[in-house]
Image: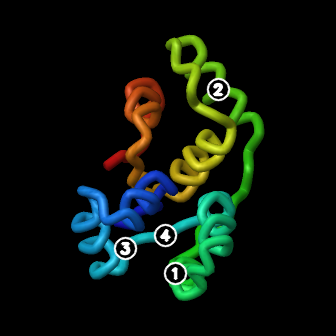
Amino acid sequence: MSIIVDSSVWIDYFRGGKYSNQLDLYIEQNIISTNDLILAELIPILKIKREFPVISLLRNITLIPLVINWENIINYQTKCLKHGINKAGIPDLIILDNVIQNDLTLYSLDKHFKLINNHIDFELL
């Protein structure tokens, strides 16, 4: 199993939140991955806070290449809107497509992914 860790989980982790122990376990098992979109969400604030060691660690996580299939994104957004899921932004749908394309498990704390998972098949922790 390979897990792509969403920025919501990383933010909780950096704050010492209640999901920190679970992420520590996945880190120890060496089963986590990321993509450039997630890094682009995290690294700017870490640069401002001068957290360069954390940035270095994030950059050493397995990087899953992004191949954006815009037709898939359109289909996901259409499905979401049909089912009243209005809070799923395009960046989240790109992450979703990355997860599906690469047969990964998504670890996210964002509630809209749970709603999406009711209508689009993907592995969600």
Q: Residue at x 60, y 16 (%)?
A: 81
Q: Residue at x 54, y 67 (%)?
A: 34
Q: Earlier in the sequence, mark 2 or mark 3?
A: 3
Residue 28 image offset from top left, x and y in percent: 28, 81
> Which label number is shown at residue 54?
1
Quadrant for residue 67, please give it: bottom right
Q: Which residue is mark 3?
A: 31
2 and 3 marks in contact (CB < 8 Å): no
Q: CA distance from mark 2 to mark 4?
A: 24 Å
> Which label number is shown at residue 103?
none
Q: Earlier in the sequence, mark 1 or mark 4?
A: 4
Q: For numbered disc 4, what is the local secondary structure?
A: strand
Three-letter amino acid code of the residue under disc 3: Ile
Q: Which residue is mark 4?
A: 33
Q: For numbered disc 3, what is the local secondary structure?
A: loop
Of labels 1 and 4, the one closer to you: 1
Of labels 2 and 1, the one closer to you: 1
Q: Tally the numbered discs.
A: 4
Q: CA distance from mark 2 to mark 3?
A: 29 Å
Q: Residue at x 34, y 77 (%)?
A: 27
Q: Which residue is mark 2?
A: 77
